[in-house]
Amino acid sequence: MLSMNTYPYLLNGQWQESSSNETIELVSPYKDEVVGRVQAMSRDEVDEAIHGAKRAQQEWAALPVNKRAELLYAWAEKLEERVDEIGQIIMQEVGKNLNDAKKEVVRTAEIIRYTAEEGIRFNGGFMQGDSFPGGSKNKMAIIKKEALGVVLAISPFNYPVNLAAAKIAPALVTGNAVVFKPATQGAISGIKMVEALHDAGLPKGLLNLVTGRGSVIGDYLTSHPGIDMITFTGGTGTGQHLSQQASMVPVVLELGGKDPALVLEDADLTLAADQIVSGAFSYSGQRCTAIKRVFVLENQADELVDMLRERVAKLSVGSPEENSFIVPLVDAKTTDYVQGLIDDAVNKKATVVYGNKREGNLLHPTLLDHVTTDMRVAWEEPFGPVLPVIRVKSLDEMITLTNESEFGLQASVFTQNVNSAFTVADKLEVGTVQVNGRTERGPDHFPFIGVKQSGLGVQGIGRSLETMTRDKVTVINL
Ligand SMILES: NC(=O)C1=CN([C@@H]2O[C@H](COP(=O)(O)OP(=O)(O)OC[C@H]3O[C@@H](n4cnc5c(N)ncnc54)[C@H](OP(=O)(O)O)[C@@H]3O)[C@@H](O)[C@H]2O)C=CC1
Ligand SMILES: O=C(O)[C@H](O)COP(=O)(O)O
């Protein structure tokens, strides 16, 4: 660490200051304090980060996979040793409550270890020619899995350690090198995570860390000819733009969502209310997988809304240092945006059942009833603690409204009838349907996928290993 909480970037094994002499100041979301500064890297430095990674990659890929896995095991151990320290940094930098911030670090170590284990067992295949008409047993294909080269990993602010490592670990174990660009608000947490990897014995250049505003260096990175694959998590607008910049390289995008909860007539309402409130309001709704709207039949709506209000009223509101459930949002711009969605709904005659109170970046949990489809909050992603309830006439209407969204990340279906669960799940245009549970990414070895404007490609430990490799086929003609 440099003086005055100014953090360096990592280039070819050395922690360095940028020759741009420019730094970016990061302000805490919940107190009027500078958390630290990160380097605004120049284009020349970005070039060197990519070239250095390219140089390191071949030697790394040539190592036995069990040796590559050793680095991941050591990294997981180093992270676990620093749970308290990194947890504190995540809390200060992105305002996640301390317990959840520490859990994020522990979960990250678990992901890294599981990825190492899967990586060791990850293999190609073998095919024999005679399965195809006219083919011969004497023609055989050996299919090996090869690394793609240099993977560009770009992560968002809300899981600054976990979502970054979920990209870096599969890339490394499969023999790729990585250029890692953390979200600027979240970069210090990312730097600390990379420090742990460096301490674990990261070979020089195998992962280079790039800091700087995405709006300044993002396009340069994503269109750089030295990048062989891009794995990105962030907003839909950024992801759409990125996919136009990148050319002829595989791109995996995990983007925004508008996950609905569909409460069917035979739902266990207590279970539904518990899961909906936890799903909608954890980390103040700053999760791509948060439940962002509820569909309920008119004849059950009063009962469900009462149950939701009772639970929302019990959520603790305040500082992440006190482990509050509802914490200040990441910045004023986001808070203004979420407040704008609430104001629009209220102006169009939605009922405020609870909340709609703001203190700086702290928005109290807000439950809106009688939300209608002409209101922005019925369709737009808030990334904040607001939950709209939309009263509908039929199950078909729930399905139609789900599918009319531009997003397709996840959906929750609450029902006690297994046949209804499967029938409805099959009709929903989303990556994952959770039956009788809140929408969420984990467990982290499950495939994680967004369709429509929610993403492209699949993550999840096993799937990421597939995505970050290509088949190399050697055919033997006996
Ligand atoms: N589906 C999923 O798995 C998840 C989706 N999200 C989505 O992410 C959003 C919130 O995260 P947030 O961090 O605000 O998202 P952003 O899209 O603002 O930023 C994500 C990352 O992209 C970078 N970036 C910005 N501009 C460019 C560019 N032109 N080229 C390349 N990279 C760029 C950012 O850098 P910088 O910070 O420097 O601007 C950051 O590292 C929400 O919409 C949420 O739904 C979040 C988590 C999970
Ligand atoms: O960034 C996000 O929002 C995460 O991918 C959600 O993860 P979670 O569902 O495990 O909170």
Image (spheres, rainbow, N blue to C red):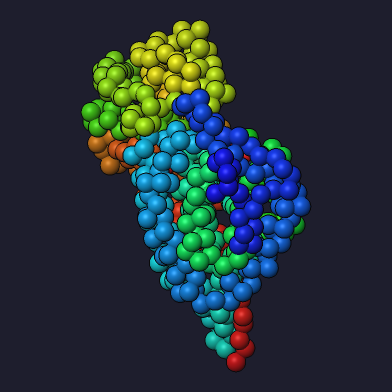
Identify the residue at image location x=57%, y=67%: 203
Q: Is residue 147 above or below residue 445?
A: below
- Exactly how many numbered labels are in the figure? 0
Which quadrant of the figure shows ligand 2?
top left
Instruction: Kindly tell me whether residue 137 is visible in this rendering.
Output: yes
The picture places residue 137, in percent across and down from the top left corner, at 54, 86
> Which image quarter holds the C terminus?
bottom right
The picture places residue 262, in percent across and down from the top left corner, at 37, 30
Identify the residue at image location x=43%, y=65%: 74
Residue situated in front as seen by the camera: 163 or 184? 184
Instruction: Kindly tell me whether residue 152 is visible in this rendering.
Output: no
Q: Could you say which quadrant of the image residue 278 lies in?
A: top left
Residue extending furthest toward the bottom: 478
The picture places residue 125, in percent across and down from the top left corner, at 51, 75
Residue extending furthest toward the front: 3
The picture places residue 392, in percent across and down from the top left corner, at 39, 20
Residue situated in front as seen by the camera: 162 or 438? 162
Q: Is residue 373 above or below residue 442?
A: above
Identify the residue at image location x=51%, y=22%: 335
Identify the residue at image location x=51%, y=55%: 195
Residue situated in front as seen by the camera: 265 or 8? 8
Residue 321 relative to residue 226: left or right: left
Residue 384 relative to residue 185: left or right: left
